[in-house]
Every structure is written in C-alpha cells, then in structure tokens.
Amino acid sequence: MVDTSPRSEADLIDLAYPCALDAVADIERRHIDARLAAADPEVRQAFSDTVWQVRDVMGRLAVLGELAPPPELERRILAALPDERAERSSTRIASWRRSLRWVAPIAAVLCLVIGGSVVTAQLLGSHSDPAAADQVHMRTVNGSFAGGGLLVVDASPELGRAVVVFDRVAPPPLGRVYQVWLVGSDGQPRSAGLLSDVPSTERPFVTGFRSGEVLAVSVEPDGGSDAPSGDPIVGVTLP
C-alpha cells in the first residue's frame, strides 16, 4: 500500500510513479489529489511531467514488446548468468520468450533512472550505440471523448505500431464494447479490435497502422460490427 501521509514535496513527486502506472487505490489517489491541490504550482507541474514521462516510456516499451527480441539478446542474457543456471537454461527458453513482456515495468524504472534512449537501444539490440534508439520515434496524439475523458495514442510511424490508452474513460455500457477503427484515405473504416475493458497504461491496446490514417472509436453491440453503427465518439489522425 502506498503511504500517502503528509511528508516532503519530493515524496509527493515520488508518488507520481505509481499513479502513472495505476498502482494506487482510489482512496490513496484521493489523498494524493488533496496533497497536490495544496502544493506549490511548481510541484504540481513536476508531478504532471513525471506522470507523462512514465506513460511515454511505457508506451514506447509496449511498442517494442510487439517486436521479436533480437537474436543476440538471448545469448547476452545467458552469458551473464552463473554457469549452473546457464546449464539449465535450455529447458527454460520457451518460458523466457513467453515472459519477455514482463520486462516492461522493470525497464520503465530503468528508463527513468538512466535515460530512456539507453534502455530502448539495448532492447533493440544496440547496446554499444544508444543513438540508434533515435531511429524509433514515438509521437503522441490525443483527442477528447464525447462523454468525457481522453484518448492518448503513442504512435511510431517507423514501426507502424500505435499504443492506445483511455484516460478517465468509463467502461462501455452493459452489452456493448468499444470498437477501434482505422480509416484510410479511401474513407473506408476497418476494424482494429474490440475493447470490452478500458485500455490503461498497464494494459494498453496495441495496433498496427499506416501513416495518415484516422484512429477512431465507436460504441458497438457486444461482438462488434462490420461497420460503425454510428458516429465515432473520438478520433485522431496518426502521424
């Protein structure tokens, strides 16, 4: 449980990290919000900047998680293990591959400590040249839902991947789902997926896309629709 008792302003900013990861209970978040309301404007800005930094890192890692790990990554990990663990590693390779995405929360912390470009470069298999990470550009676009809340999309045109998060958006009504659409220059929407739950920073929705497409969200009957049954409730143009 996060301790929200009044302490230093530095401690308040530290709480931005679990908040960004949705790792605090509602009552704890209310305590934090109360402390923020009473804090100096500079502290509130630092808190907000930290939240967005964490979410940006998680968005980048979610996109990288869609890629297969570089072949030499497994060799480097095995080489770093003690001999007795390396001898048993062959029986665990399949399990390790399935578990690779769980690296994201740990790597997010490392990104915040030593710089996102270094960790991103290592995940891309270029530990000797952190500047190689600059080849992957994440661009953030957002739009407001008609019923309140925010659609936040971190998109990489180079990878053709977009990470979708809903911020302060209610779940779909009973018997309904959110359906994500991609609309190209021909104006014809194609379904990118169904969302029965609200995608969060911890569990974002990741989809492929082509630059210039519009990502839109509509509310559809359970099971989805072949085409939007009404106007989208939010939409953004992807870079």
Image (cartoon, helix red, strand yellow):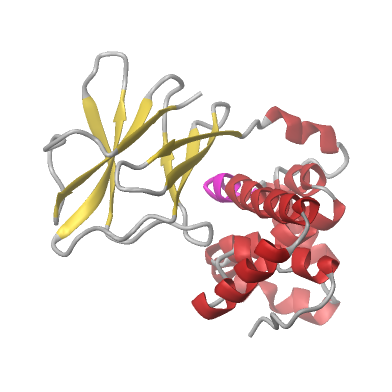
Near-viewer residue (100 or 110)? 110
Front one among 81 and 204: 204
Farthest residue in the front direction?
38
Kindly indicate the quadrant of the structure image that contains residue 14. bottom right
Residue 184 vertical position relative to residue 99 in the rendered view, above or below = above
Q: Residue at x 77, y 42 (%)?
A: 121
Give the camera-side residue of 169 and 205.
169
- Identify the residue shown where x is 30% and y is 47%: 147
- The quarter of the picture where the N terminus appears is bottom right
Number of numbered tags placed on the structure image: 0
In the rendered image, residue 51, in percent from the top left (x then y), is placed at: 66, 54
Q: Which residues are magenta?
A: 62-69
Q: Quadrant of residue 87?
A: bottom right
Q: Is residue 129 magenta?
A: no
Point out residue 212 in the picture as x, y percentages from the top left corner: 43, 19
Residue 66 location (% of width, % of height): 52, 47
Q: What residue lies at 61% left-to-right and 60% top-to-bottom?
A: 20
Residue 140 lies left or right of residue 136; in this view the side is left
Q: Residue at x 73, y 45 (%)?
A: 120
Percent from the top left, x then y, of residue 46?
A: 76, 52
**Vertical placement of residue 217 versus 32, above or below:** above
